[in-house]
Amino acid sequence: MIISAQGLRKTFVTKSRKGTQTVEAVKGVDLEVKSGEIYGVLGPNGAGKTTTIRMLATLIVPDAGTATIAGHDLVKEPGQIRRKLGYVSQAGGVEEQNSPRAQVVFAAKIYGVPDPAQAADEILKKMDLAEIADRPGRTLSGGQKRRVAIALGLVHTPPLLFLDEPTTGLDPQNRANLWDRIKELRQQGTSVLLTTHYLEEADALCDRLAIVDHGVVVAEGTPAELKRSVSGDVVTLRLDELERAATVLGPMAKQIRVDEDMLRVYVDDGEHALPPLLRTLEAEGLSLRSIALERATLDDVFLAKTGRSLRDTGAAA
């Protein structure tokens, strides 16, 4: 394991005119990340994702718990850990005035890379930034800036890369391009730990992931395993009188949920469940506008594990 953490906790104390407030951001997180995998931490804003990754990156000290990162103790050997990891924050840290090349060369020097200029050229090429390497940072697009930020975190070829919500604010095309770059890092042997609140991102990128809510891990596994753990199928119905339909179909479902203008009915086998569902609706005089049979999603997993939808928490879905 490149990361092995047990019982990590972190509490913050803030003071304001209203008095002192104590917030337990992380309440006992356990994580095991294998070498050479993309491991995702999924959860709503405020769930404890960023605090967890900042502890593992040695940026803040945990109040309790233990962890080993790349073979080193998190609390006793932070210096050795920092030499073996790259960290890309939500803000990114790309300078507006200096060029990507100048910034990456400087980062290489800070890390003590033997030939900073050559190392910078190599990572800029890998991140598809060679053609814009000498432009001022302020002229770059959002996607280009995110790739420069990742280049800054990779110039010393660390075995482990932390990405904290790497695609927040990017358009779909830039997000897809960055996904490709992250997958390439895994193929080259880099282990990646990323936080995200984008469901499709976690599904597309992660070999395994943890769902975090209120500072604890509520579920862990591959995306496929997590979705299978919730339900075999989801029957999506669009009709009038959603609440009434939910009441009459409730006894026939493992779980049922009114979601905006539709009703989602969770069942083990959708094909066998459809006929009795339709007969019940007809008997109750409820007319269907549309019906669809789907597999469970990561949002369905979040609902099952926390009692609410990730889309309902304020995070993007």
Image (cartoon, helix red, strand yellow):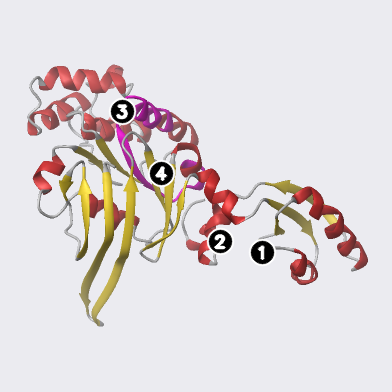
- Mark nearest the camera among 4 and 1 is 1
**Tag 2: amino acid:** Leu
Mark 4 or mark 3, earlier in chain: 4
**Residue 169 badge:** 4
Name the residue that disc number 3 marks. Answer: 189
Alpha-carbon neighbours of circle 1 within 10 Å: few (<14), some, or many (≥20)?
Answer: some
Q: Are marks 2 and 1 in contact (CB under 8 Å)?
A: yes
**Residue 257 badge:** 1
**Tag 3: amino acid:** Gly
Query: Disc 1 on helix, strand or loop?
Result: strand
Alpha-carbon neighbours of circle 2 within 10 Å: few (<14), some, or many (≥20)?
Answer: some
Query: Disc 2 on helix, strand or loop?
Result: helix
Residue 316, above or below 250: above
- Mark nearest the camera among 2 and 4 is 2
Q: CA distance from mark 2 to mark 1?
A: 9 Å
Report x, y in % for residue 193.
Answer: 33, 43
Query: Disc 4 on helix, strand or loop?
Result: loop
Mark 4 or mark 1, earlier in chain: 4
